[in-house]
Image: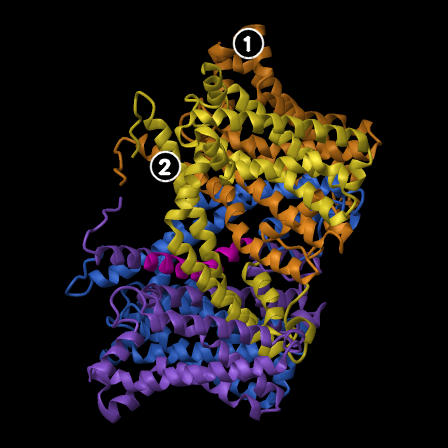
Chain colours: A blue, B orange, C purple, D yellow
C-alpha cells in the first residue's frame, strides 16, 4: 500500500528523516494560526469585529483537523504497533491522539452551546492544540525525558518548598491573624501571602501590618526565597541540559562531526 | 527480646535497610493527613462544616501518635546508646523525640483551652509534625550536613546582606525620612522598605516619592539585589549538591557502582 | 591618498590597533553627552530651564555628527569593500550607517515640527545614538555572535515560555473570567496577569480574587517561574561566555600571554 | 619599645596570626552593639524610652573609639610605612583611618546640633562603623580583590543594563507618555518604571494602562530581565569565588594541606 506509506511518511514527525515534511509544516501553521485566532476570539471587542468570520474560520479549521485526524488514524496502520482495527483503537487511545481529538471537537460543536462556562471551556480546549507543537520538535521530546531523570530531586525540592510555604504561613497566621483576619485568619489564607512573597511576586494585596509581622516576614523572605527557587532552578537546569544534549546529538548524527569544546 | 527488635526495625528509618518499613509508611501517611486536616481546620468556614468531626479526628490521631511515641521509646532500647532507664531519658531529650512530643501533645490537650492565642499556637504545633518528615528521608539528612559544610560562606554572605540592607535603609532614611516619616522616619522603618525592595518582592506599600529617593532606590536596587541573592544562591547550591551526593551515594551502595564524572 | 587613510584610521574602530583612536574617543563622548542631554530634555521641567540652550546644543551636536558622517562616508573608501560611488552607496545602506543617519537627522530637523508625537519620536531617535556605542567595543561585537550561536536554544525556550504564559492565562480566564471580566475576561487580558506574575514583577493591578483562582495562580507561579526564567538564563549565560571569551582573546593578542587558571 | 609592639599586635588584624586578638574582639563587639543602638535610636518611639541613656551611651562609646583611634595612631609606628610624624599623617589619611575618624566624631559632637538633617546625617555616620567590620575579616579583604578582577565585565554589563533601561523607558515614553504624563511624561520619569519592572521589584505605583503599553511592557520584561540580572550575577559569582578562594587559602596556610578537588 504505497499511498498509505507516503501519507504516513508525511504525517508522522519521526518517520520523516530530514526536518519536517511538507504536510507537517502545513499542520504546524494551521495549529499556530488557529490558536492565535482562538486566543483573540476570547476578547469580546475583537470577536465583535466579525462574529461570522470567526465562526466560519473555526468550522473550516475544525474540518482541516478532522481530515488530518482521520488520515492519521488510517495511515498509522503502517506502524507495526497499530495494525488492524484493534491497533487503530489502541492508537486512538494514546495521549497524543486523545489531545488531537479533544482539541478538534470544540471547533465542530461550538454553535450548539449557549452556556457561557461551557463556551469558555470549549474555546480553551482549542488552545490545547498548542500542546501538539511539542510532538513536532525533537528537543521537546528530549525535554520530557530530562525532567523525568531528575524526578526525585524535583519531588524532594517541591516537598521542601511546600514545607517552607506552610511553616511561614503558620508563623504569619499566629502573628498577624488576630489583626488581619481576612488575610491571615487561617493557614490556607496565609498561604496566599506565603506564595506571593516567597516567589517574590508581591502583588501587594496582602502584606503584614504589625511590627512583629514585618520582622517575621523579612526573616522568612531572606531565608525562604532560596528554597522556593530550588524546584525552579532544577527545572531550568534539566531543560538547559536537554537542549544541549539534543543539540549535540543532532550534530553527531551528521556525517562530519563538529568537535565542541 | 525479638519482638522489641522487630518493633524497632519497623519504627527506626535507619534500621530498616530497603526503603521505608510498613509501619513508617503508615506513620508518614498519618503525618501528612493530620497536618492537612490541621491546616484546613484553622479556616473557620471549613471547621464550621463539622466541628465535632474535626475534634474526634484530632483525638484519634493524637492517640495514634501517642501509641507510636510510647512504642518508639520502648523499642529504642535496642539502640546501644539508649539502653536502660537513663538511656530512654537521654532519648526522650533528643531534638527528634522532643518534636514528636510537642507535636503530639496539642492533639490531646485541645479541648481544655478557650484562650484564642493558645488555641492558635496549639494548632500550629500540630503542623510541626511535618518537620518529622525529614527524618524519613536520607536526602533530607544529607541536606543538613551540606548546609553545615557551607556554614562560613552562609554566615559571611548573610552578614554582607545585612550590611547592604542597613546601608540602603540608612540612605533612604536620610533622603525620604523628612517627607514620609511613617515609612522612612527611622532606620528600622526604612528596613522594611529595604527588605521588600532588595528581595524584589515589592508589595507596593512602601516606595520612595521624591526624585532623589527614586534615584537612590534605583541605584541601590541594581547594586544590592545581587548581594541579597547570595545567601539564597549559596543555600540553593548546597541543597542541589546534597541531592546529587545523596543520589550518587544511593547508587554506590548497589553492587555495581556507576562511575560519575 | 595618505590623508584619507589617516582619517579612516582615526574613525574606524577596527582599523586602529591599540584601543580607541583620539577621534573615536571624542565621538564616544559626544554620543554619551548628547544622549544624556536628549534624555534630560524630554523632562519639561528641565527643558524649561533653558529651551534656547537645549535647542542650540542640539543643532551644534547635529552638526558634529553630520561632519563625522560625511567624513566617515568619504574615508570608508579605504576599505576595499566600499570603493567608488557604488561602494559608498553600499556602505550608506549598512545597518551601522543607517543608524548613524537616523540618529543624526532629528537634531537637524527638530525646529520644523509642532506635532507632539512626531517630536517625541524625533527625541527618541536621538537616543538611538547609544546603540552606536556597541560598535566601539570588541566585547559587544562578540556578544552578538554569542547570542547567535545559542539561537536555537533561545527560540525553543521562548516558545516554551510563550506556551506557559498562554496556558496559565487560559486557566485564569476560565476560573476568574466570570468574576473579573475587566482583568480576566479574555485570554489576551489574562496574558497581562500571566506576564506580571511569571516574571515575578507583580505590580498588583491584577491578581486573582476567588479562592480557586488563588490556588491556580499559586500552583502556576511555582511551576511556571522556572520556565519563564529560561530565556533569561540562556541570554545571561551567552553574554557571560562572550565576556570571558573576548577577555581571554584580548589577552592572547598581546605579546606576552598571561596564563589564567 | 616592646609595649607599643604589643599594642600594635593587639590592634592590627593582620599582625595577629591566629584569628582575632582579644582587643579586636572587644572592638568588634563595640562596633556591633553601638551600631545596633545607633539604628534603634533613629526610631523616635524607642529613643523616647530613655533619651538620657542613649545620649550617655553614645558619649561613652565615642570615648572608647577615640581611645582606640589614638592608640592605633600611636602603635601604627611599628609598621615601617607609617614611622615618624610624617608616617602618622600618611596613616591618618588612609581610607581606613578616615572612616574610623568620621564614624567616631558624631558621637562626640551630637549634643551641639539642633538642625534635623545634620542630626540625621550624624546618626547615619555612626552606622558607618559597620563598614569597619570588613577589615577584620580576611574573606572580606579577598572580596574586594575579586570584584576588582572582574571590573571590566562588571562595567560592560552595567553599561548594557543601562542601555536596556534607557531604551525600554524611551519606548514607554513614546507609547504611554500622552496618557500618563505624570508617570511616563519624560524619559527620566519612565526610567523609574524601567528600574521597578526590569529588576522585577514591581511596587505597583507605576504600570502601563494602554493595551499597546502593556504589550510593549510584557515584551520588554521578558527580554530585559536577563540583561538586568547580569551585573547582579557577575557580582554574586565574584563573591562566591572569593569565598571559596579565601576558604581554600586558609586551609593551605595550615601545616597539613587539605587537597581540594
Which residue is at a point 48% across and 57% down the rendered structure image? D229
Task: List the residue tagged with mark 2.
Answer: D245
Disc 1 to disc 2, how far (Cα)? 45 Å
Given residues C87 and B1, the one toward you in this image is: C87
Q: Is mark 1 on a helix, strand or loop?
A: helix
Q: Which residue is situated farthest in the front direction here?
A: D85
Q: Main secondary structure of the magenta part?
A: helix
Which residue is at a point 25% across and 33% down the rendered structure image? B256
Report in which chain the residue with disc 2 lies.
Answer: D
Q: Nearer the viewer, mark 1 or mark 2?
A: 2
Residue A213: percent from left, percent from top: 72, 42
Position of D213 compared to A242: left or right?
A: right
Which residue is at a point 42% across and 51% down the rendered structure image? D234
Report in which chain the residue with disc 1 lies.
Answer: B
Given residues A166 and B66, the one toward you in this image is: A166
Compared with residue C5, is residue C159 higher up or lower down, i.e. above or below? above
Q: Quick check: is C234 in the magenta stretch?
A: yes
Compared with residue B235, is residue C126 higher up or lower down, i.e. above or below? below
What quarter of the picture does the C terminus of chain B occupy? top left
Task: List the residue tagged with mark 1.
Answer: B87
* The image quarter in which residue A72 lies: bottom left
Residue A63: percent from left, percent from top: 46, 83
Q: What element carries label 2?
A: helix
Say how many tags the image has: 2
Start-end of magenta stretch: C222-243
Amino acid at each position: 500500500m504505497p499511498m498509505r506509506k507516503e501519507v504516513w511518511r508525511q504525517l508522522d514527525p519521526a518517520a520523516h528523516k530530514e526536518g519536517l515534511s511538507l504536510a507537517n509544516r502545513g499542520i504546524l501553521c494551521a495549529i499556530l494560526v488557529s490558536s492565535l485566532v482562538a486566543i483573540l476570539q476570547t476578547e469580546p471587542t475583537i470577536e465583535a469585529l466579525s462574529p461570522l468570520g470567526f465562526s466560519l474560520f473555526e468550522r473550516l479549521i475544525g474540518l482541516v483537523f478532522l481530515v488530518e485526524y482521520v488520515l492519521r488514524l488510517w495511515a498509522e496502520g503502517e506502524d507495526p504497533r497499530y495494525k488492524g482495527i484493534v491497533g487503530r483503537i489502541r492508537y486512538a487511545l494514546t495521549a497524543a491522539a486523545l489531545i488531537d481529538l479533544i482539541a478538534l471537537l470544540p471547533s465542530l460543536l461550538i454553535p450548539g452551546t449557549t452556556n457561557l462556562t461551557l463556551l469558555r471551556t470549549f474555546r480553551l480546549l482549542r488552545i490545547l492544540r498548542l500542546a501538539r507543537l511539542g510532538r513536532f520538535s525533537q528537543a521537546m521530546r528530549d525535554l520530557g525525558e530530562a525532567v523525568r531523570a531528575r524526578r526525585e530531586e524535583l519531588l524532594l525540592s517541591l516537598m521542601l518548598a511546600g514545607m517552607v510555604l506552610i511553616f511561614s504561613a503558620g508563623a504569619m497566621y499566629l502573628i498577624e491573624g488576630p489583626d488581619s483576619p481576612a488575610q491571615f485568619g487561617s493557614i490556607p489564607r496565609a498561604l496566599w501571602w506565603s506564595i506571593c512573597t516567597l516567589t517574590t511576586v508581591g502583588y501587594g494585596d496582602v502584606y503584614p501590618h504589625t511590627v512583629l509581622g514585618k520582622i517575621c516576614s523579612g526573616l522568612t523572605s531572606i531565608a525562604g526565597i532560596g528554597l522556593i527557587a530550588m524546584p525552579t532552578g532544577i527545572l531550568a537546569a534539566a531543560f538547559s541540559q536537554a537542549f544541549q544534549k539534543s543539540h549535540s546529538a543532532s550534530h553527531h548524527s551528521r556525517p562530519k562531526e563538529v568537535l565542541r569544546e
